[in-house]
Amino acid sequence: MFRLLCLISWLLLLPFPGFSGPEPFNPATSEPLSVQQDTTDRQVIFNGRAWRNLYPKVIGDQFLFGKEFLPGSVTVEGRAFKNLLLRYDIYNDEILTITDHGIILQLNKEMVNRFSFTYLDKTYDFFRHDPDSVNTTGGFFNVLYDGGVSLYVKHRKEILLLAVENRFDLFQESHRIYLEKDGKMYLLSGKRDLLNTLEDNKKQIRSYIKSGKLTVTKKDPWSFVPVIEYYDSLRH
């Protein structure tokens, strides 16, 4: 009897012939999205662990731009992998992908250098930044401008306890804006921080904002970009 049970358990672990699970597809075109077929490559990109949702009772979700998997690419230890489906968990700062067998994997973020995905016809690029004195947590940053100086956004979510009807927890999204200048990262809370960080050309920057009637606000990180571009042009 014991041997019979062992045999049945072993047979259950074998794959069923002809079954490979749902095939990933590009939501924009409904065309299949293939992953790397080489065994070595697959081991590199799939060097992670199976993902499971730890927050089913929290209202909302932990992802940037929602639960949908988005077409994108990942660079792992300097090797680029394209035609993947990605989802970015900004609560845990983790990247998820889905295999050609429909298995959701959490990638080993210590091995990921960069990743990007497309949402509403716009490409979002991220890179991994190691912890420093300003941003002690490190992690993945969205690149808004990359030049002599660079502008980044750190997307985050937190869980607000009993925030809905005093009964349910709620995911709430926020972000932080960083300027990288001369090898240092500066946290920007608004226009004043921006001017102070760009103090070597502060008068020109202030005049540029005024003459162009520009609104620079933390609510819209992209509003910083024209000012950063102008400052970069002054330095070159």
Image (tube, rainbow, N blue to C red):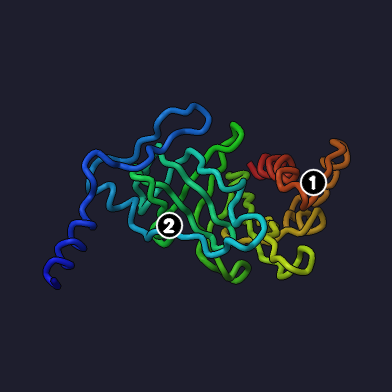
Q: Residue 232's x, y, as percent?
A: 66, 43
Distance between the Cα atoms at labels 2 and 1?
A: 43 Å
| Residue behind mark 2 | 106
Q: Is residue 135 left or right of residue 207?
A: left
For this orientation, the residue located farthest to the left is 3
Q: What is the quadrant of residue 124 in the picture?
A: top right
Q: Residue at x 62, y 63 (%)?
A: 57
Q: Is residue 52 left or right of residue 214?
A: left
Q: Is residue 11 left or right of residue 190?
A: left
Question: Of the residues shown, which amino acid type is indicated by label 2?
Answer: Gln
Q: Residue at x 30, y 42 (%)?
A: 20
Asked whether 37 or 100 is in front, the reply is 100
For this orientation, the residue located farthest to the front is 1
Q: Residue 21's x, y, as percent?
A: 34, 42
Asked whether 17 or 130 is in front, the reply is 17
Q: Is residue 95 visible?
A: yes
